[in-house]
Image (tube, coloured by chain):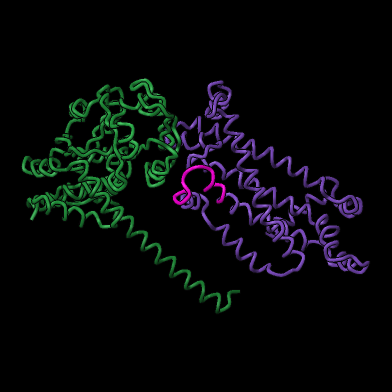
């Protein structure tokens, strides 16, 4: 027996369930990847994609707005997770423009590559890319691991490069993500390439504020922070040079499909040419510190560089 | 099964046993952190729990407070504290103490509450002072539940101490996080196995201890128990009661 009150509740439940189903069906039809596929096959829009990483989305938005200013129609497909997901989409022509990083992309297509310097990596990448994909010129800006020290430490000990560390008499600990201890550029690489004994202190915030705090507190002497991180400029850190190219370079590089014509390539090249490491740090700071959207950040930057408007 | 065998091989490799990052050293840190956290939490929670249990006051507040504290995500708390206190064991230690307090507090006051009111009335009737009632009646009778609280607190803390490794404080979590971030699942699984083994060993030790602390008078006077089942002791019953009252 179902009494009236219970019946009423069941009706409400039923309504909620139907509502949820309708909403979910709506989600299913707006799958970003299948949408991208439709758009590129049915219209002339250039599809710009980005990784699920705020800094990558800002770079993608720079390309997108510059292309729009040049008269192109742009379809934005941002926040796509892993290379395993979006590279097949690029290869199949569902995405036309994607900001990438030279070293990691080269590793994806050619695990055996021995390229080390930024130039070597860039040319090896051009060879490694599959047919239909082209790497435009890499930007000066990069987003890679780097060893940083405080300004005081650098000045007191005259250390500006990883090669200078071997003359330092004290013990050296590096605050870094846990994987650093096992990576070729971690303590074993520092020992074999630069002759420096370093112990790794794992801090699992991806070179974030806690890693930098440990450095400023003096708990560690070196901090592994990404070169595009706004924390480097904010805390006056000195990024140590890497003359032997121990760390694989990760310069920003736009990957484009055959659908992108010469004019569009020239527009993207113009954006990349001005994007310096400190510019990228500032753009990231606007996202992280000021919480601005990628659209606002990109518009401001492109206008200030007279690339749009 | 392969990962399991690989992990055992990893643990047997002498390279992973020596030095400050070897398994024995990390295990030592892990045990030390866990015991210290539970000890500090016990110093805070037991007197408060006894007070609540003895007076019967403040239970609502205690339940609401500890319930709220239990909802705190420990990982978040560790990072939040570390951003103020810096890397090292201080920040995670505070978070582990916060994690351990609710179970111990619940064990302490529910142990007192579980004592038969008639027993306490009898103690009062024969002229015992309040202090004597606490120390000679409520405490010994409530001890199995308190140990149960300590046992579950320690278990949670042993599992959670792995995150000390995320703020440079070491412990067995180092293998789990290094393995996770470098896709070395053998190392990750090996680290997990040691944590699991540690948890099981401590669990066994505490369940034995929980049986031992049942007062002789209580243990002798339970013909009802033995008639129902021969294997379950009062202490074991006390555990289920404690779990129910948390």
- According to the rendering, which colour does chain B have? purple
Viewer-proximal residue, A283 or A8? A283
A286 left or right of B113?
left
* Residue A274 seen in render: yes
Query: In the rendered structure, which segment of residues is drawn in magenta?
Result: B82-94
Q: Is residue B92 a member of the stretch shown in magenta?
A: yes
Residue B233 % position (x, y): 82, 48
Position of residue A254 measured from the top left corner of the image (x, y, whole percent): 18, 39
> Drawn colour of chain A?
green
Give the x, y percent position of residue B214.
Answer: 83, 50
| Foreground pick, B113 / A25 | B113
Give me the residue at 55% from left, 34% from top: B191
Which SS does the magenta portion mostly show?
Answer: helix
Residue B95 position (above or below residue A150):
below
Q: Residue at x 11, y 40 (%)?
A: A269
On screen, residue B156 versus residue A203, left or right, reads right
């Amino acid at each position: 027996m179902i009494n009236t009150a219970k019946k009423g509740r069941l009706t409400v439940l039923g309504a909620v369930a139907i509502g949820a189903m309708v909403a979910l069906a709506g989600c299913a039809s707006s799958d970003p990847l299948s949408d991208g596929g439709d758009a590129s096959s049915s219209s002339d829009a250039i599809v710009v994609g980005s990784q699920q990483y705020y800094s990558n989305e800002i770079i993608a938005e720079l390309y997108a707005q510059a292309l729009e200013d040049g008269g192109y129609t742009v379809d934005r497909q941002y926040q796509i997770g892993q290379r395993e997901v979006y590279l097949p989409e690029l290869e199949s022509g569902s995405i036309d423009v994607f900001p990438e990083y030279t070293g990691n992309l080269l590793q994806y297509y050619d695990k055996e590559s021995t390229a080390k310097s930024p130039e070597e990596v860039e040319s090896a990448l051009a060879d490694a890319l599959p047919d239909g994909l082209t790497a435009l010129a890499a930007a000066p800006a990069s987003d890679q691991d780097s060893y940083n020290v405080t300004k005081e430490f650098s000045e007191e000990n005259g250390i500006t490069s990883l090669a200078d560390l071997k003359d330092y008499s004290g013990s050296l600990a590096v605050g870094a993500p846990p994987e650093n201890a096992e990576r070729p550029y971690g303590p074993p690489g520092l020992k074999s390439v630069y002759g420096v004994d370093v112990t790794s202190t794992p801090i699992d915030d991806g070179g974030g504020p806690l890693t930098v705090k440990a450095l400023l507190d003096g708990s560690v002497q070196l901090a592994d922070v990404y070169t595009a991180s706004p924390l480097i400029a904010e805390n006056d850190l000195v990024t140590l040079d890497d003359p032997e190219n121990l760390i694989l370079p990760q310069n920003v590089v736009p990957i484009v499909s055959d659908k992108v014509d010469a004019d569009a390539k020239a527009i993207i090249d113009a954006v990349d040419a001005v994007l310096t490491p400190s510019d990228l740090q500032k753009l990231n700071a606007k996202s992280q510190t000021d919480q601005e959207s990628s659209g606002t950040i990109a518009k401001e930057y492109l206008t200030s560089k007279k690339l749009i408007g | 099964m392969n990962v399991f065998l690989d992990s055992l091989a990893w643990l047997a490799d002498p390279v992973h046993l020596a030095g400050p990052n070897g398994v024995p050293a990390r295990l030592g840190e892990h045990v030390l952190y866990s015991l210290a956290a539970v000890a500090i939490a016990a110093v805070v929670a037991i007197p408060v729990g006894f007070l609540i249990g003895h007076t019967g006051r403040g239970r609502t507040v205690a339940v609401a407070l500890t319930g709220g504290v239990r909802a705190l995500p420990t990982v978040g708390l560790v990072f939040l504290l570390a951003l103020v206190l810096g890397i090292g064991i201080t920040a995670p230690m505070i978070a582990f103490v916060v994690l351990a307090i609710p179970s111990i507090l619940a064990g302490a006051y529910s142990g007192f509450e579980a004592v038969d009111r008639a027993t306490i009335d009898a103690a009062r009737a024969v002229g015992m002072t309040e202090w004597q009632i606490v120390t000679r009646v409520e405490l010994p009778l409530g001890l199995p539940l308190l140990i149960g609280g300590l046992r579950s607190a320690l278990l949670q803390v042993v599992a959670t101490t792995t995150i000390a490794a995320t703020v440079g404080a070491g412990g067995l979590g180092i293998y789990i996080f290094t393995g996770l971030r470098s896709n070395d699942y053998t190392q990750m699984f090996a680290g997990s196995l040691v944590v699991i083994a540690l948890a099981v060993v401590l669990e066994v030790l505490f369940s034995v201890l929980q049986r031992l602390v049942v007062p002789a008078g209580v243990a002798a006077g339970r013909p009802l128990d033995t008639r129902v089942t021969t294997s379950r002791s009062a202490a074991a019953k006390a555990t289920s009661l404690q779990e129910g009252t948390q």
